[in-house]
Image (tube, rainbow, N blue to C red):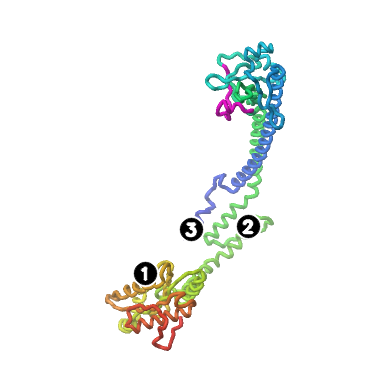
Amino acid sequence: MQEPQLANAVSPTAKLSWHRSLVGKVVIFMLLGVLFAYLMGALSGFFMVERGAREQWWREAQVNTQIVSATIRRIYTSVAVKTDDTGQVTHIISPRAIGDEESVLETGFSPVDVLALASAQTRNNVWLFAESPEGSLEMMADARNTPTETPAKLEVNSWQSIAESADFYVGFARIDSEEHFISSLPIVTSEGRLLGVVVSTIGQKESLYEMRNDLIYKAFLALLAVLVATALLVSILMRQLFRPVPVLVRALTDIAKNQTQSTTPYKHRNDEIGRMANAIDALRKKVIEREHLLEVKDEALRFQHLAHHDELTKLPNRIQLNDALKAAVHSLLQGDVFNVMLFDLDHFKEVNDSLGHAAGDALLIEASQRVQGLLTENDLVARLGGDEFAIIQRVSRSAQEEAKVLAGAIVATLHEPFQIDNQAIQIGVSVGISRAPTDGDNSYDLLRNADIALYAAKAKGRDRYMLFTPGMKMTTNTVREV
């Protein structure tokens, strides 16, 4: 059933779309590789340019702060400055607001004149902001004396309140409708109360990012050109390289259909295609042996199963029981507990003699199925031969109590009548139980003691179970080997 499906899946008559063909996939892979490498290089260069630009902007903004603070100190001699550990001016300390009428009378300079002096040196606009009644920062004056209907406002995303604007800041900020890269120099009293903010810019965001945008545009055009050239070149090369592939696909399809008469072409080529062709031809020579090997494998699996299972009841046999018992004994070292039960069917010989072996076999099969239905997934029941069976019961809590429950259930279920050839047959079962490690810590002792308990159950009248106890003896001198 699998061969027709395989043949249909690789039908040589079905034409693949370009993107699903081997050539298309290689071209796409190459384009993705080129795109990835280009983007990685472009991103690395972009981040380096961006980081370098921001560092340059930062330094330039700090220099502007120094220039503005020096200009203000030259005119307003009553002010002082606060610096950080590097000597960078971070605050202007003044007893009163800069630019009010009293300061104009004292110095002879209006705020616009002072800002214009600073702007002449920074070559960019400078603003003076003061706190408005609404709690925002509004422009008092700028170096260019820009006329506005409403005072321009200073908005910085990182500021959550006016109190935080009393800190020195370098970065992007919005002044009215324009976004600038600024340095803000707070004007505070000696007690730390904010009087105003002097803001200088190094330029608008659009002009600062103009070089970056130009770089991105040129990189995008170059990428398109590289991708188009790569796609054309790789497509031509791949079509020539993979021309034999459809022929080899047809050869594999013939092999899938068990059509092995024709030899595989391109075996003479001294490259990977030639190696592939020789490999396909070797597969063609071996495909005939496949069915035979599968038959041999199935036969081996069947014999392996027969070697470990009873052919009649399909239960594990004596060999598998011994292996499982050895593993269970080994698990005693990890603290596991288990029970070993031996049981055989009472009066089974009479059923065999009176109704024949066919009825006896049917009785054994149904009895084994009843017992299997009583076990958990961790238990194992095996047929030792004739009407003799053995169970390895894994214990979760109490070995004795769980053994009594299972053995009692076996006695009860096998005591119920069997319907064999439309006849009701009544039998019983005798069960002997040994507990590990209480009654033994090796296979021989556990089986021997379970066998002794089984004979004790028979001696007490059959159709019952007995747990091994010290002092129990066999009623015969023979101990059965399992």
| Residue bearing the label numbered 1 | 374
- Mark 2 or mark 3: name the one nearer the start of the chain: 3
Q: Main secondary structure of the magenta part?
A: loop
Residue neighbourhood size for the residue with mark 1, other residues' Cα within 10 Å, grouped as few (<14), some (14–19), many (≥20): some
- Is 415 drawn above or below residue 92 in the view shown? below
Residue neighbourhood size for the residue with mark 2, other residues' Cα within 10 Å, grouped as few (<14), some (14–19), many (≥20): some
x and y percentages locating residue 117 in the rendered image:
70, 16
Question: What is the span of residues highlighted in magenta in the rendered image?
Answer: 151-168
* Residue 358 visible (yes or no): no
Identify which amino acid the numbered label 1 is placed on: Leu
Q: Secondary structure at mark 1?
A: loop
| Residue bearing the label numbered 2 | 276
Identify which amino acid the numbered label 3 is placed on: Pro
- Is 37 drawn above or below residue 182 in the view shown? below
Q: Residue sitting at 60 percent across and 52 percent down?
A: 245
Evaluate if marks 1 and 3 touch, with contact meaning CB atoms under 8 Å apart: no
Residue nearest the viewer, comparing 189 with 150: 189
x and y percentages locating residue 345 in the rendered image:
35, 79
- Mark 1 or mark 2: name the one nearer the start of the chain: 2
Describe residue 364's horizontal placement relative to residue 177 as left or right: left
Q: Residue sitting at 38 percent across and 83 percent down?
A: 455
| Residue bearing the label numbered 3 | 4
